Image: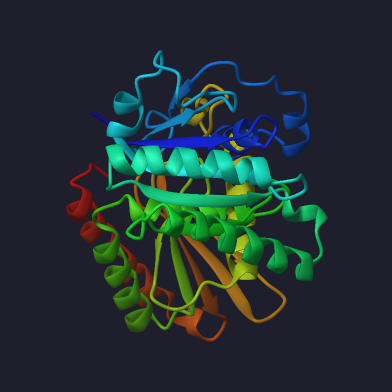
């Protein structure tokens, strides 16, 4: 059975919008016309993505005390529970629902990762974002402490579908569910050190979720540049590539040995190479280091071989 990620929250908190933007390339403006989710929606993204999970969109009106819902089935095979809190609304009711959801889920499956998306923060100032996250985190953890759920850990993320924060937050969730993540991080760190590269990411092409990165801190601007590069490559592939690589509107896959180079105005170069049909490695390289492209390409070949062995996948 494939591991699943549950997306929960009150009605109109943005659950379905997140799923559509991240996994179905829907424009954020188009999500304004999405209908309210009335039943559990199961989305298997493994056919169009490297990420081999099911995404379950849980309607906001679900009653956890209603015996018609099989909570053991819902939470039993779940790897992560994402609870979406609308930061632009009164979130006291959402916190009550959050406590009910995570406490029920934790008692059924203590292995679940609990991720709180403080959502729709694009309309808030930086100070307001920080204060909102602090208040929600404090209130949620106090309720858990009062319920003696001291082993239940919540992770908090500030998100919006109008920037790349939702992709970065989802990346961190997915990374926790990949058993080989630490191995991938070590491989990428070794690759960076031996290639004179500033930063590198291993991306799932369709969702723009980064499966892993090297050990250095992630700079949001660098991550956004890499995401934009993938969009450029996909657009070019859509126009000039083989139609066989178009995934029926659900997303795209790379062609064999895809390569893309973009020179920035700050003496850095973005360098993309295909790893598998759904995975690409994106490197940030200084202009002077890129003169040794032969070494970088050779190390990428070794990196691809190692990643294939880690996941036991075909190139």
Name the one closer to the observer, 250 or 101: 101
The quarter of the displayed image where residue 15 is located:
top right
**x and y, in percent, of residue 180 in the image:** 24, 57
Quadrant placement of the C terminus? top left
Name the one closer to the observer, 206 or 55: 55
**Image coloring type:** rainbow
**x and y, in percent, of residue 29 in the image:** 78, 35
Residue found at the very far top of the displayed protein: 68
User: Residue 249, can we see it?
Assistant: yes
**x and y, in percent, of residue 87 in the image:** 72, 50
* Residue occupying image coordinates x 32% and y 68%: 185
Residue found at the very far bottom of the displayed protein: 288
42 left or right of 106? right
237 left or right of 197? right
User: Residue 51, can we see it?
Assistant: no
The answer to whether residue 119 is above or below residue 181 is above
* Residue occupying image coordinates x 28% and y 58%: 304
Q: How many labels does the image show?
A: 0
**x and y, in percent, of residue 270 in the image:** 56, 67
120 left or right of 133? right
């Amino acid at each position: 059975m494939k591991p699943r990620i549950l997306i929960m929250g009150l009605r109109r908190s943005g659950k379905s919008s997140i799923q559509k933007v991240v996994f179905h390339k829907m424009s954020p403006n188009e999500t304004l016309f999405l209908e309210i989710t009335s039943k559990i929606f199961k989305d298997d993204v493994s056919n169009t993505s490297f990420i081999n999970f099911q995404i379950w969109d849980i309607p906001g009106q679900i009653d956890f005390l209603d015996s018609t819902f099989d909570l053991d089935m819902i939470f039993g095979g779940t790897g992560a529970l994402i609870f979406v809190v609308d930061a632009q609304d009164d979130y006291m009711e959402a916190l009550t629902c959050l406590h009910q959801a995570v406490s029920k889920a934790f008692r059924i499956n203590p292995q679940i990762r609990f991720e709180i998306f403080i959502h729709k923060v694009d309309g808030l100032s930086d100070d307001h974002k920080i204060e909102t996250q602090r208040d929600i985190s404090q209130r949620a953890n106090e309720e858990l402490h009062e319920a003696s759920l001291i082993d239940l850990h919540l992770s908090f993320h500030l998100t919006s579908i109008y920037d790349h924060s939702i992709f970065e937050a989802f990346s961190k969730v997915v990374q926790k569910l990949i058993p080989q993540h630490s191995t991938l991080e070590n491989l990428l760190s070794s690759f960076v050190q031996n290639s004179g590269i500033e930063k590198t990411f291993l991306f799932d092409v369709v969702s723009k979720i980064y499966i892993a990165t090297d050990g250095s801190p992630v700079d949001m601007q660098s991550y956004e540049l890499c995401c934009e590069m993938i969009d450029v490559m996909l657009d070019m592939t859509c126009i000039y590539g083989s139609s066989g690589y178009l995934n029926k509107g659900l997303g795209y896959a790379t062609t064999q040995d895809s390569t893309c180079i973009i020179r920035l105005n700050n003496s850095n170069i973005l360098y993309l190479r295909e790893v598998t049909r759904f995975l690409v490695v994106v490197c940030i390289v200084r202009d002077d280091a890129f003169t040794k492209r032969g070494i970088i390409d050779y190390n990428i070949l070794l990196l691809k071989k190692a990643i294939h062995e880690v996941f036991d996948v075909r190139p």
